[in-house]
Image: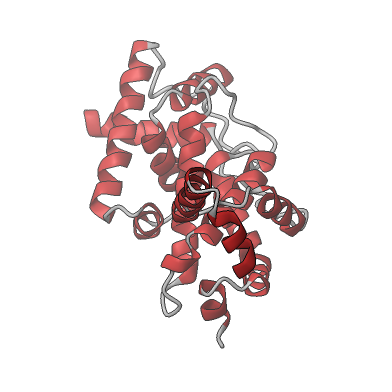
Amino acid sequence: MELLQRFAAGDLDAFEALFRQHQKEVYAWIVRIVRDRGIAEDLTVETFWRIYRARSSFKPDGNFIGWTRRIATNAALDHLRSARSETELPEDLAGPPQPDSAVRRETREQIKGAFRQLPAKYRLVATLALIEEEPYIKIAEATGLSANLVKIRVFRAVRLLRKSLSSLAVPLGAKK
Amino acid sequence: MNEQNDEQIQELLKRSIAPVSDTGLRRDLWPEMLKKLSEQPVRVPWFDWALAAILSALLIVFPGTIPALLYHL
């Protein structure tokens, strides 16, 4: 019997094999959304727990990776919704600062603060589309939305940011 | 003008929050998964609880059926 069929039938060994095959990929996806190593590890386990519970609804001829990514995205979104917006964005996972240091530190902090205040559903798509530069179609598959709706949410996220930064009198065209 | 501002915001966002560069998993999470699996309480279906309740009620109302039940077990 195929691995996915065995998994759908409740075989724990098959589940372990799938877990070991995909845990790195699931973690890598989640950590880019939540930007915290420990939380991403917990959410990876939570994702596979949801997968295990929903095994009977999985069709063995279906797309396991796509299904897994969608469950992982939902788990990460649930975390963003429940986490306090005041929580700092962890810095240690980010790459080195952009060589172009045109944006002042104070402005960067204001932008980060405004970004943290975005509703979770907007923060999710904005993180993936604008920061991680994932294609809209991939985000759409992961969120279960259409690519158009993803674009609309990114657009709204940018508008909310603009509004928020305008109220803080952040110089949007600031160089230096 | 707004579109121009939106583009500026996207640029500022990219410069302020860098993409995650280290996405590597540093440890095997299977032991954590096993722990979570074993922590979950065994869920008894509602039907089993209903059967148990009916049987208990019968034994209380008709205690004479207890020897017959034990005989058949």
Q: Is residue B28 left or right of residue B66?
A: right
- Where A82 falls versus A109 (above or below)? below
Q: Is residue A168 left or right of residue B73?
A: left
Can residue B31 be seen by looking at this rendering?
yes
- Where A95 falls versus A175 (above or below)? below
Which residue is found at the position 57% from the left and 30% from the top? A101
**In which image quadrant can residue B1 be found?**
top left
Which residue is found at the position 43% from the left and 41% from the top? A124
Q: Is residue A141 left or right of residue A42?
A: left
Residue A5 is situated, as x and y percent measured from the top left of the image, at 51, 80
Q: Nearer the viewer, residue B15 or A48?
A: A48
Q: Residue furthest bottom?
A: A1
Residue B26 is situated, as x and y percent measured from the top left of the image, at 76, 53
Q: Nearer the viewer, residue A156 or B32?
A: B32
- Where A175 falls versus B24 (above or below)? above
Can residue A132 be seen by looking at this rendering?
no
**In which image quadrant can residue B34 be found?**
bottom right
> How many numbered marks appear?
0
Which residue is found at the position 49% from the left and 18% from the top? A110
Q: Nearer the viewer, residue B9 or A60?
A: A60
Residue A155 is situated, as x and y percent measured from the top left of the image, at 28, 38
Which residue is found at the position 60% from the left and 69% from the top? B72
